Amino acid sequence: MRMQGISLVPDPQWRLMGAIISFYFGARHQADSQDFQRSIAQIMARVPTVVENTRALQALRSGTPLVAQSAPSAEFTLGALALSDNPVLREW
């Protein structure tokens, strides 16, 4: 019964519906593609910062206490590494 109703739809109306549906899905595909390209561009813009941060972290891992002192944003001092007179540690 449904197929009989579909066969009553005139051919120009099928063409119009096909064009509307094609434009709708085509526009969605284009918008998704542009969003993807925009996100890739944002990620690529962040790469130099990530590389710089990675190098700074690797420099801090080198194991020498002087590296922490030479880092521009580090608040470490060599005084923090000095042994203090702690009676509990002496007892232990």
Image (cartoon, helix red, strand yellow):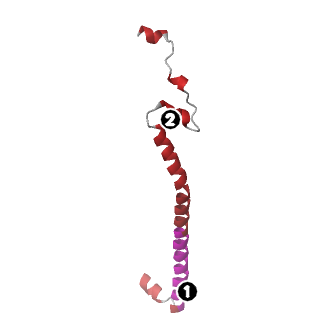
Q: Earlier in the sequence, mark 2 or mark 1?
A: 1
Residue located 55% across and 81% down the image: 20
Q: Is residue 59 magenta?
A: no
Q: Which residue occupies the foreground of this view, 64 or 19?
A: 64
The kind of secondary structure element at disc 1 is helix
On screen, residue 67 above or below 15:
above
Q: Residue 26 placed where, x, y %?
A: 52, 77
Residue located 55% across and 51% down the image: 49
Residue located 56% across and 27% down the image: 77
- Residue 1 in sight: no
Q: Which residue occupies the foreground of this view, 37 or 67?
A: 67
The N terminus - image quarter: bottom left
Residue at which label 2 appears: 67
What type of secondary structure mainly makes up the magenta span? helix
Q: Residue 6 placed where, x, y %?
A: 46, 85
Q: Amino acid at mark 2?
A: Val
In the image, which residues are magenta? 12-33
Residue at which label 1 appears: 16
